[in-house]
Amino acid sequence: MKLKTKDNGWNPYFAGALVGLLAIASVYASVVLLDKSNFIGASTTFVRAAGFAEQVVVPERVAANEYFAKTRISVDWQFMLVLGIFFGALISSLTDKSFKLEGIPPIWRERFGSSLGLRAIGAFAGGIVAMVGARLADGCPSGHGLSGMMQLSISAFVALFMFFAVGIVVARLIYKRRLL
Amino acid sequence: MTTQLWLGLVTGILLGFLMQKGRVIRFEKQVGALLLIDMTVFKFMLSAILVGSVGIYALAGLDIISLSHKPMNMGAILVGGALFGAGWAIMGFCPGTSMGAVGEGRYNALFAIAGMVAGAALHAELYPFFKKTVLAWKDFGKIGLPETLGLSPWIVIPVIWVAVIGLFYFFEKKGL
């Protein structure tokens, strides 16, 4: 087994194991420094971002909304974590020269051609559906897939199964135009 | 900035760095996993889960941290999980990795992020409806696998390790 992959990345078993250690250190640090057990997640931050955006245009709608009230629209630990992911990936990709401006991923191009508009519509529409799903399920591949699985939560096993089972079927239908 | 915000930022930077080094952020790897042609995302996630579960259960066993299971609400998990899977396949990013994808220059993730913010707003509007329907079907509450099976986590975790390492062996043997 090689320590570097063909695309000059780190061995995924090794990088993944380090994320496991980070998740442990992260919840430990949050208990010591903040006196609460914080587990890594990402999708709640999109609710807060939507709340902030709506507050600019229709503040009374945000104030009256039950889900926004429940989530509390503020910049919190997870919000900064999601921002941090941007900076971490930026630092890593610039220092190992894997940073690349890309509007249309190759698999997408092969199936749908090189229209950036079409890719934008696909990414936007997919984003809407995925986030409604993630908020209904109360988590995404970070909250359920990593944190929930590490805690052996039943909800995480079922959610992750659904993410991948439906994702695999839909990806085959879209990119290969067949089910099997 | 408060300690809370600094801690979140530092954790996020380290996470983004490791996910980028593992090359799991980009569309090709995410959709590649869903098309079962590139196992990188599976290798990365499962390795994190194996290592993380030992530490998390050790800390919880010592009463240093408390576990926080998300509720096993049937409608929420089945319908929400299915919607997420479908949207994920089209978008090719997930909420956490989308920010990282922008960080490594894959700027089409910006459209995905905009879509996800719109989706979050839509969900907030639909929440009263979901609460009366999908979310009201059946809620098993915040349950974990060990207590559901009536087994110690120190039996469940080694079994998962053996199963996942078997899967890794299969990936490597097949050159996936």
Image (cartoon, rainbow, N blue to C red):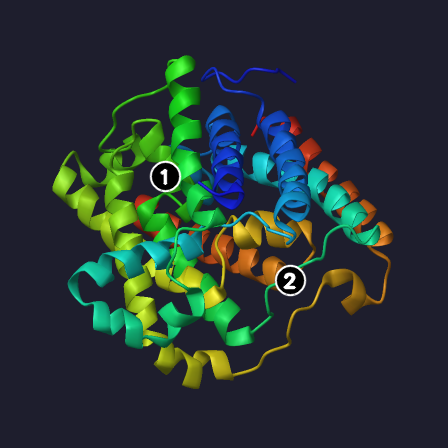
Of residues B53 and A44, the one nearer the viewer is A44
State which chain disc 2 sits on: B
Is disc 1 on the same chain as disc 2? yes
Q: Residue at x 43, y 81 (%)?
A: B131
- Give the residue drawn at x 33%, y 68%: B123
Mark 1 — residue?
Answer: B99
The three-letter amino acid code for the residue at tag 1 is Met
Chain to which the residue tagged by mark 1 belongs:
B
| Image spot of residue B154 (x, y percent) | 85, 50
Q: CA distance from mark 2 to mark 1?
A: 25 Å
In this rendering, position of residue B22 left or right of residue B163: left
Name the residue nearer the viewer: B35 or B121: B121
Kind of residue sitting beneath label 2: His
- State whether residue A177 appears in this view: no
Residue ID at (57%, 82%): B138
In which quadrant of the rendered image does the C terminus of chain B lie? top right
- For label 1, count other residues whose C-alpha is less than 10 Å away and answer few (under 14), some (14-19) or many (20+): many
Q: Position of residue A163 (x, y in %)?
A: 48, 56
Label placed on residue B69: 2
- B65 relative position to B155: left or right: left
Number of residues whose C-alpha sits closer than 10 Å to that of mark 2, classed few (under 14), some (14–19) or many (20 or more): many
Q: Secondary structure at mark 1?
A: helix
